Amino acid sequence: MSKGLPTRSENYSEWYNELVKRADLAENSPVRGCMVIKPYGFSIWEKMQRALDDMFKDTGHSNAYFPLFIPKSFLSKEADHVEGFAKECAVVTHYRLKNDPNGGGVIVDPDAKLEEELIVRPTSETVIWSTYKNWIQSYRDLPLLINQWANVVRWEMRTRIFLRTSEFLWQEGHTAHATQAEAIAETEQMLDVYATFAEEWMALPVLRGIKTPNERFAGAVETYCIEALMQDNKALQAGTSHFLGQNFAKAFDVKFQDKEGGLEYVWGTSWGTSTRLMGALIMAHSDDSGLVLPPKLAPIQVVIVPIYRDEEQLAKISDRVNGLVKELRKKGISVKFDDSDAYKPGYKFAEYELRGVPVRLAMGMRDFENGTVEVARRDTKTKETLPFDGIVDHIANLLEEIQQSIFNKALAYREANSFRADSYEEFKTTLDEKGGFIYAHWDGTAETEDKIKEETKATIRCIPLDAPEEEGTCIYSGKPSSRRVVFARAY
Amino acid sequence: MSKGLPTRSENYSEWYNELVKRADLAENSPVRGCMVIKPYGFSIWEKMQRALDDMFKDTGHSNAYFPLFIPKSFLSKEADHVEGFAKECAVVTHYRLKNDPNGGGVIVDPDAKLEEELIVRPTSETVIWSTYKNWIQSYRDLPLLINQWANVVRWEMRTRIFLRTSEFLWQEGHTAHATQAEAIAETEQMLDVYATFAEEWMALPVLRGIKTPNERFAGAVETYCIEALMQDNKALQAGTSHFLGQNFAKAFDVKFQDKEGGLEYVWGTSWGTSTRLMGALIMAHSDDSGLVLPPKLAPIQVVIVPIYRDEEQLAKISDRVNGLVKELRKKGISVKFDDSDAYKPGYKFAEYELRGVPVRLAMGMRDFENGTVEVARRDTKTKETLPFDGIVDHIANLLEEIQQSIFNKALAYREANSFRADSYEEFKTTLDEKGGFIYAHWDGTAETEDKIKEETKATIRCIPLDAPEEEGTCIYSGKPSSRRVVFARAY
Ligand SMILES: [Zn+2]
Ligand SMILES: [Zn+2]
């Protein structure tokens, strides 16, 4: 039940935590920092996976699977990479337990110490490039376009379900190319795939941009990202695509023979999205009554609730509704007819509202006799009574309309919460009073970026790909700048 | 290329290893005991996953996700379980690395020792039942029908790709029920699902049976299994379904309020299949030329190879073939038109044979002019030249025929290699000279089972569910027995 869900304006953070819990999306596990993704939450993630996977395959990628463990020494092979990832990670040091001779249950067997410790993968560039070395000899082996769906672990002290957990689920693409241009084109293509997925499936408008060197993936030459705005006016990075140059090829000695017979290092990319997208989906659209799901990702798109006094009435309504259920399913619409006797209609309404079911139909005896049905939209919370005849087409159209409408609302919200700041004072005032995306001039140095972050907790989310040239001066240093970048406080 | 693939009769084990490697299914990774599943192999696994997942959902199950790590103390809560699983497992003892002050790269940070070690899950009963405790209060919360697709780790000293690896991929179902009868029905239902999948998708005939107490899952009251026979006459366990009784409910204190208001322990089941099925699929059907794949699991069902001398000929053939490709795809048949110039037809033929593509079409200029096409079956290695008109329907039927034919062949093989033995001498002779499934009387004791295993390396694969009652005497002890059980040497 949604009763007592905190409101967003009261306490956005509590609202999120409670919503995740009450809508049966996920919960904290007995293992610190790791989550349990519950069936309802997981079914949304499955829909995301399926849509992304189809897009990866349509762009020529295949799935594969690489080991969970990475030998400790691998991490050190790419100098930047080890700085970024070797630190907070789960380390396997032993491979056996034994009975405590003193009767204290099981203990780690000191005789079963690994010669070289294994790291639970925080990301798989190292183990994958060490494998690619054997797979790539000639230009004929390129491009190599591979993706993997996997769990990864990055030890976190402060965790939040979906947004930052020690273990999370993700996909990581790892590709190898003969030329720099081809690798950059791949990096940009996958950013496009992510942006298209965010906008068309998640109904989430995103900025496409490039990260500053400070925020770049450890080991990348360039990191592209998509950035979305949440309802508390904080930014959320929803996907990254990295151009790796020849960094990993050099670290793992991956060369290929080109058409002319010369030996050259391979060019690489990697790109990933994770269960973090679940957090973005929840925070971007939901309201004080619960989840709002875009129809394309809703596990149940339409729920039908009968309102009846006795078995005879239920039988009549069911009889009419069963045909509708069949027709909707024929159109590929997922529908649930909730005729369970355990709960009253009002309880069911609140429950499906909480779970974000996009369309709710209700039919009572009056509707039955009048040949009508009540149609309620989750996103706008509007209701109308419509003729039962022709309702199938109406619902099919309505689902498309809702998908578009949720996107439009989020886009309008982002537009209304995107600001320009031309001085540091203006920047700080906007940040504190409004938040959102702040477009401002920056001198291009890491020092300025660090100072601003230190003083305001805002980071440069990206240099937008479509940023127009504009002469200006850095809000912090006053030095010249040729385009605005996007600042925000972020998840 | 298949050139030089060892033959099965020469060296079955080498044949398997080389086939796995050359057909691009999988390879050993730089991490001891862990494999890399290559794109072609993974695409077969994806088809298996999809089919199984659909069957799980059709029987009312939902997917969820539970943590990779299990606190060490959890394993000790179910007494048998810890004996079975706590021993050979990956133990995480630290959560941070740091730079070696002596300049030796990164080392484990001794200050980042976990208070309680974490085990990388070898199976998830413990962490799942500790979660179910919070999810189950009343009979209304039951049954709870959940599955998870995950990676698990069981440290192995002697590994073989797909058959026994330290990390493997699997699914594990974990269900909770109000009554013993319901839990047993679930256990049996999932065994049926596995058997149906093995027979209808993998074309692999299986025995359905019950494990002896010796071979039972650690923590189960009863373990059901499906057992298949490989071409070297060794058995392979292809799936298990466990009735857990109230063991895990008691270990994790999971009770529910029944309809009458009483508090009772919940009844449980768990069931799993893994990437081991890939090993079974390969070993059951393939031949000395390479893989033989049942069409339902073949990533490419039909390959079309043009035979031409110049661009003009290729253009003519392509023109005709492109329409066919479209029509086959419309029927849901996956087809590849290999018009690449890099390799000659003969090379391509061998390559697709190695990879087990069920149907190969070839079209040269003579076919083009005669309005024919050459159709080759991978399983029987037969060829026929057929009219191009009507070829689509012919191929659709042929794929079904091949699926059935591969099953029939495997079934005939198993029947021809199932034996009865009525004395220990006969048993040992049959085992050494023929192998296969040996039906024999057993006195029902673990002692006899252990002795036979020690002396012959044969184990009791199962007590078949359909074993008829038959009075007899144990081949080892001469004690009375009322039905035959199935012995074999096994993977
Ligand atoms: Zn960005
Ligand atoms: Zn068995």
Image (spheres, coloured by chain):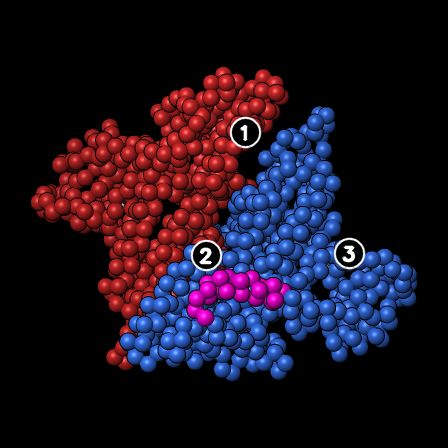
Chain colours: A red, B blue
Amino acid type indicated by mark 3: Asp
Q: Chain of mark 1?
A: A
Find disc 1 in the rendering and name its residue: A338
Question: Left or right: where does residue A4 sit relative to residue A271?
Answer: right
Q: Dot 2: what SS? A: loop
Q: Dot 1: what SS? A: loop
**Where is residue A319 drawn, in percent x and y?**
56, 28
**Where is residue B329 drawn, in percent x and y?**
42, 58
Q: Are marks 2 and 3 in contact (CB under 8 Å)?
A: no
Amino acid type indicated by mark 2: Lys
Residue closest to the eye, B275 or B411: B411
Q: Quadrant of the C terminus of chain B?
A: bottom right
Q: Are marks 3 and 1 in contact (CB under 8 Å)?
A: no
Span highlighted in magenta in the image: B387-407
On the question of residue B471 being in view, the answer is yes
Residue closest to the eye, A411 or A397: A397
